[in-house]
């Protein structure tokens, strides 16, 4: 028996009685491994998925497989891109139930093995909207957000600037923490809390042990979502004209994110200098220029930024690596 496992098709394409199937619970962790990595990362970035959902439960008629679970799998979720809108995510699979000789079963009692692969996913919202990647030719396994128009980008940038101004005028209370590390990488974090609650500003400094490091500064909106990001990476080298002096090189990148995690604008400038005064002079003279970030790295970068807003100090080392890797992916390194 080989089927695409929506219950309707299951009963239509086989003579096995419907009574042989029922609904049973299943942990999302038991399903996520069969979802392609790119699709899984997209879904887990876009939605907060319930830990337990529904599956098709095989009845006792299936002998050794009785009580087992098969698709379709449905999980309650909340959209991170629609201000927490409730929805249901369906993981639709192709399944094959075979006997001891690897042939499709004709009688449920002959069932020995369930072979199951991911087919497509669908998302249903309470307002009737349905999203799906079913039947898409040459389906992109990592769906991208709808492309922003120039007007969309301008509106998002305006919103981000408003968030920045709001944070700057808000009276914050600061505390700090240290990144736990057993190698050459070390770092510290400063968090700024608004009196009404929530983190509005973060500065995370990481020294990589290779004559440099990076700093990421996050400004969040009033729902604590990353909005404006200032990324600074720096390194130093000896001055080729004077071995007693060093030259510092700094690259600054600015990222403007919507509340849904869409990257609307990215700017970059770089400068070098020998000594603090020289470095500041060259920084002020350097101009920001637009650059096109690789969209493949944006979801992972935004997810790591969001994690940094919420995390405790024990997770800083992991997030430092995730931030660096995702940012490198965005700029094509």
Image (cartoon, grey):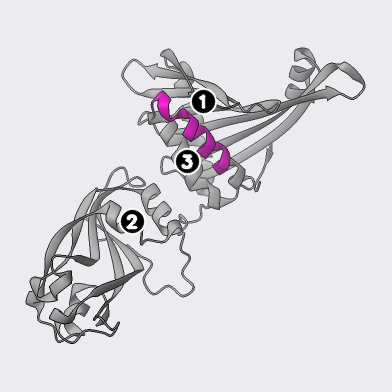
Q: Which residue is outermost to the front?
A: 100
Q: How many discs mark residues in the rendered view? A: 3
Magenta region, residue range: 312-326
Discs 3/1, front: 1
Give left or right: position of 155 versus 286.
left
In the rendered image, which residue does mark 2 sit on? 32
Q: Which comes sooner in the sequence, label 3 or label 1?
A: 1
Q: Secondary structure at mark 3?
A: helix
Q: Which comes sooner in the sequence, label 3 or label 2?
A: 2
Q: Residue at x 63, y 34 (%)?
A: 253
Q: Secondary structure at mark 2?
A: helix
Q: Which comes sooner in the sequence, label 1 or label 2?
A: 2
The span from disc 3 to disc 2 (Cα, nearest Å) is 21 Å
Give left or right: position of 147 versus 67.
right
The span from disc 3 to disc 1 (Cα, nearest Å) is 23 Å
Residue 308 or 220: which is nearer the viewer? 308
Q: Secondary structure at mark 1?
A: loop
Task: Where is residue 291? Give x, y as percent.
Answer: 66, 44
Report if residue 174 lies within the magenta region. Answer: no
Give left or right: position of 141 versus 69.
right
Dot 3: few (<14), some (14–19), or many (≥20) neighbours within 10 Å?
Answer: many
In the rendered image, which residue does mark 1 sit on? 181
Principal secondary structure, stretch drawn in magenta: helix
Residue 40 seen by the camera: yes
Residue 130 seen by the camera: no
Vertical side of 15 occupied by 198: above or below: above
In the rendered image, which residue does mark 3 sit on? 302
- Quarter of the image where one finds residue 269: top right
């Amino acid at each position: 028996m080989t089927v695409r496992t929506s219950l309707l098709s299951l009963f239509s394409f086989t003579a096995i009685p419907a009574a042989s199937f029922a609904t049973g619970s299943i942990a999302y962790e038991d399903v996520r491994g069969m979802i392609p990595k790119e699709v899984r990362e997209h879904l887990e970035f876009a939605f907060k998925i319930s830990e337990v959902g529904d599956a098709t439960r095989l009845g006792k008629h299936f002998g050794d497989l009785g009580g087992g679970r098969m698709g379709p799998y449905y999980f309650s979720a909340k959209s991170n891109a629609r201000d927490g809108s409730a929805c249901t995510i369906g993981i639709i699979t192709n399944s094959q139930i075979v006997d001891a000789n690897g042939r499709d079963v004709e009688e449920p009692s002959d069932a020995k093995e369930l072979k199951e692969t991911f087919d497509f996913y669908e998302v249903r919202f309470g307002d009737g909207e349905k999203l799906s990647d079913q039947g898409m030719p040459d389906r992109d396994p990592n769906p991208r957000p709808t492309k922003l128009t120039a007007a969309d980008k301008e509106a998002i940038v305006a919103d981000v600037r408003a968030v920045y101004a709001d944070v700057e005028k808000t009276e914050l209370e600061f505390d700090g923490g240290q990144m736990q590390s057993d190698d050459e990488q070390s770092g510290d974090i400063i968090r700024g809390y608004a009196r009404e609650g929530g983190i509005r500003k973060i500065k995370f400094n990481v020294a990589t042990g290779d004559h440099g490091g990076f700093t990421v500064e996050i400004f969040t909106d009033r729902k604590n979502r990353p909005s404006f990001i200032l990324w600074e990476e720096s390194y130093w080298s000896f001055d080729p004209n004077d071995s007693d002096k060093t030259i510092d090189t700094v690259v600054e990148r600015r990222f403007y994110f919507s509340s849904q995690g869409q990257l609307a604008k990215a700017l970059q400038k770089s400068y070098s200098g020998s000594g603090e005064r020289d470095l500041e002079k060259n920084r002020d003279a350097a101009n920001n220029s637009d650059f096109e970030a690789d969209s493949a790295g944006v979801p992972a970068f935004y997810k790591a930024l969001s994690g940094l807003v919420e995390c405790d100090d024990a997770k800083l080392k992991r997030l430092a690596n995730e931030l660096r890797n995702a940012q490198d992916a965005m700029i094509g390194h």
